[in-house]
Image (cartoon, rainbow, N blue to C red):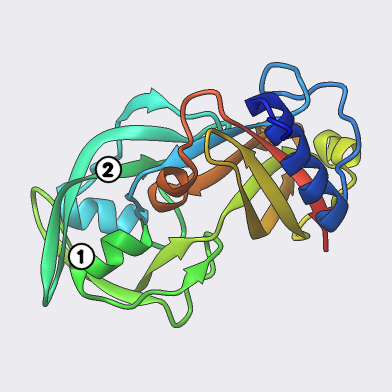
Amino acid sequence: MNYYSEKDIRDIVAKVVNSSLGEAPAVKGNASGGGEGILVEVSARHVHLTVEDVETLFGKGYRLTPKKMLSQPGEFLSNERVRLVTDKGFMQNVAVLGPERKRTQVELSATDAKSLGINVPVRLSGDLDGSGDMLIIGKEGSINAKECAIIAQAHIHMTTEDAQTYQVKDGQRLSVQLASDRPVVLENVIARVKDKSKAFLAMHIDFDEANAACVNDGTKAFIVKRW
C-alpha cells in the first residue's frame, strides 16, 4: 500500500485544479510585496456616503475624518460610525469609508444580509440600481437610503501594468484560487484595472468567503482561468 505525505497530496490537488482550469502564467512579482501570488484583503461590512448624506448624519458642513489609510490610494477608514436598521434587525458601529462618493452605498456579506432580514444582490461597487434599501442612522440624523445595499462581488484591484503582467483586461471575469489551509477556487472574480495612482494590487473578498477558505493575513490568490 502506498502512503502519501501532505506535500504529495497538495501537489496532486494542484495538478488536478490546474489541468481542469488552466494554469496561470508565471509572474515575476507584484505590488503586494513580490512573489507570484496576489495579496488577499478581507472587507468587513461598511458604508460609503455622499457629501449630502454625511451632513445629514453628522451635521451641516461635516466631512469624514481619516482614522487609517487603506491599501487603495486615497481611500481611508474614517472615525465615523453609523447604525444600519431594517424592519427585521439592526447593526451598530458600522464602519464608514472615505472619501465621500457620488452615491451612498452599503456593502454587506450574505450573512449580514440574512441577519438584517433583507435580500440584496451580488454586485460590483457602484452598480446600485435595483439594490437593497437601508435606514442609516448617525449622530445627528438619519437617511432612508434607497437602492444602496449590495453584497460586494469578489474582485481584484490592479494597475494597467499589473493587468499586462497577468494578461487580463478591465472587467474580465476570472477564476481565482485562494492558497489557504482550505484552498478554494472562486468564480466570476472581476478584474478592476486603473492607473497606478488609483490602484494597488490586491484581491478583495468578504468575511463569508474568507471564513469558508480559512483565509488569514498574508494569504495569496492565483489566477487559474480567464473568461
Q: Is residue 47 visible?
A: yes
Q: Position of residue 160 (x, y in %)?
A: 83, 40
Q: Position of residue 184 (x, y in %)?
A: 60, 48
| Quadrant housing residue 36 | top right
Label of residue 115 in the image: 1
Which residue, given by chain and number where applicable, does mark 2 sit on?
95
Query: Disc 1 residue type?
Result: Ser
Q: Is residue 193 left or right of residue 90?
A: right
Q: Position of residue 138 (x, y in %)?
A: 13, 52
Q: Residue at 81% across / 21% down in the picture?
A: 29
Query: Disc 2 residue type?
Result: Ala
Q: Is residue 134 left or right of residue 73?
A: left
Near-viewer residue (68 or 53): 68
Near-viewer residue (80 or 1): 1
Asked whether the beta carbons under mark 1 and mark 2 sit within 8 Å of each other, the answer is: no
Q: Residue at 54% across / 29% down in the picture?
A: 71
Q: CA distance from mark 1 to mark 2?
A: 17 Å
Q: Is residue 76 left or right of residue 185?
A: left
Q: Residue at 69% across / 25% down in the picture?
A: 7
Q: Is residue 62 left or right of residue 221?
A: left
Q: Residue at 44% across / 49% down in the picture?
A: 212
User: In the image, is residue 172 above or below residue 26?
Assistant: below
Give the quadrant of the N terminus: top right
